[in-house]
Structures are given as structure tokens and as C-alpha cells.
Image: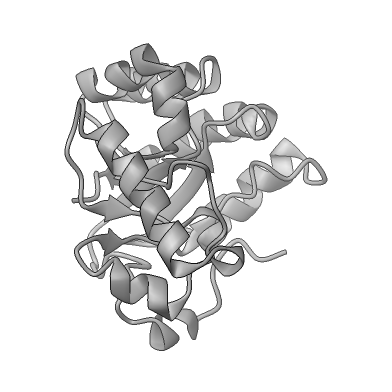
């Protein structure tokens, strides 16, 4: 199980954002698949206690279902990204259908916020889809916490995530019910560890 992406991926897809080049102690927390009552609210409370801003890649249908939770993300000053309307895999979806789904999510988000950030669900996207989404900053990651994986303990999830993180890392957590058990254990401890090492947390833009 790899917590950090293979080194060659940014060379194959240089037009995507994998990490923020820096030698400063700066990290970028991101949260996928919300807003979801419970997990998203836990994340917001944890970030508020630590004085941290982060980036939420939201599923359009979840924004539609839970507008009050989405509004709280915005009210708390976090950045928003598009994660398609129905959490589609780009590898299993035609370019036209995929772009239509991204646009549907954008329409939902734009009722409250504007964004040009996009993250493909599962990290799966084709070159044709990338080209069609050239107006977006397509954000991937270099650290995947595996918080959604029920076969990994919270302790190992934390250990692997900390070990893979470096200056400029874009880290993926999930504010979803599936990831809730590991995420609620790992997130505050991850933040505390790096804040004690002098790191700061930034939003993507």
C-alpha cells in the first residue's frame, strides 16, 4: 500500500497539480466526497480548533442534499473544488458525459461559491477529459491517507500518512461515512504532529 504517489506520475501528467513546489513548511489538506452531515461537521470543528483553512472537493449531489453543511464550509472560509455531480470515474465515462457531470456540479456549487479547482474522483481521468477541462486547475495529490480503507487500522493510517508527507504535500482525506472511523482518528493527530514541527496549512487556489 502506497501513501505517496509514484514519482513518475507528475512526469506523465505535468499539466495536473500533484504537489506545491516549495521548501517552506507548508501543507495542503484536502477533503473529498462531502458535504456529508457528521463527517464534514467533524472536519470543520477540528479545523476551526486548530485555526486551519483547507480545500473541500465537493460532490454536486451532496451539495444539493446538504446545503446547510456546504454553506458552513464556505462560512468558515475554506476553499471549494468540483468533484463531479455523481462521483464519476473518468475511465468508465465518455468525455461528453463526464464534462456534463462536471458542469452540473459547477452549477450547483456556483449558487454559493465560485471555483476553478477540480479533482477527478478516484484520480481517474483521461487525456481527452483533461483537455476538455483546461479552464480548471486539476488537482491531484501526492499523499493519500487511505482513510476510506477498512482493512487498515487507524494507527497505521496515521503512521503511513505522516511518513509520506513532505513540504508542499497535497494530502487527501475524505469527509464521508466510509472514511469516518479512520479520518476522525487520524486528522487531529496528523494536524498536531505537523503543527508541533512548525508546519502551516494552506488552501489551494
Task: Give the answer, above or below, for where 196 lies relative to 75.
Answer: below
Residue at image point 64% right, 34% down: 179
Q: Which percent across, then down, holds residue 175?
A: 52, 31
Rendering quarter of residue 48 = top left
Task: Give the answer, above or below, for where 182 lies relative to 165.
Answer: above
Q: Single out the residue that lies furthest toward the right.
A: 151
Q: Which percent across, then down, holds residue 177?
A: 64, 27
Left or right, 17 with respect to 22, comes to right
Q: Which percent across, then down, holds residue 184?
A: 59, 26
Q: Which percent across, then down, holds residue 144?
A: 55, 55
Residue at image point 27% right, 43% down: 200
Rendering quarter of residue 89 = bottom right
Rendering quarter of residue 39 = top right
Report how many numbered discs are placed on residues in the image: 0
Q: Is residue 53 visible in the rendered structure shown here?
A: no
Task: Give the answer, above or below, for where 142 lies relative to 196.
Answer: below
Residue at image point 40% right, 55% down: 119
Q: How is the image coloured?
A: one colour
Q: Nearer the viewer, residue 74 or 158?
A: 74
Task: Give the answer, above or below, for where 83 lies relative to 183.
Answer: below
Q: Is residue 147 visible in the rendered structure shown here?
A: yes
Amino acid at each position: 500500500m502506497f501513501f505517496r504517489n509514484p514519482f513518475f506520475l507528475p512526469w506523465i501528467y505535468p499539466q495536473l497539480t500533484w504537489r506545491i513546489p516549495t521548501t517552506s513548511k507548508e501543507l495542503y489538506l484536502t477533503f473529498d466526497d462531502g458535504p456529508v452531515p457528521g463527517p464534514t461537521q467533524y472536519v470543520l470543528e477540528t479545523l476551526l480548533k486548530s485555526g486551519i483553512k483547507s480545500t473541500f472537493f465537493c460532490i454536486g449531489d451532496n451539495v444539493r442534499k446538504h446545503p446547510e453543511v456546504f454553506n458552513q464550509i464556505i462560512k468558515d472560509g475554506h476553499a471549494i473544488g468540483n468533484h463531479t455531480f455523481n462521483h464519476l470515474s473518468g475511465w468508465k465515462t465518455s468525455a461528453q458525459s463526464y464534462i456534463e457531470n462536471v458542469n452540473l456540479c459547477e452549477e450547483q456549487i456556483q449558487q454559493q461559491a465560485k471555483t476553478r479547482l477540480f479533482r477527478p474522483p478516484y484520480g481517474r481521468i483521461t487525456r481527452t477529459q483533461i483537455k476538455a477541462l483546461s479552464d480548471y486547475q486539476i488537482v491531484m495529490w501526492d499523499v493519500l491517507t487511505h482513510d476510506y480503507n477498512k482493512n487498515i487500522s487507524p494507527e497505521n493510517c496515521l503512521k503511513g500518512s505522516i511518513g509520506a508527507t513532505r513540504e508542499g504535500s497535497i494530502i487527501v482525506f475524505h469527509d464521508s461515512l466510509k472514511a469516518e472511523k479512520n479520518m476522525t482518528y487520524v486528522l487531529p493527530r496528523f494536524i498536531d504532529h505537523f503543527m508541533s514541527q512548525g508546519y502551516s496549512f494552506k488552501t489551494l487556489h
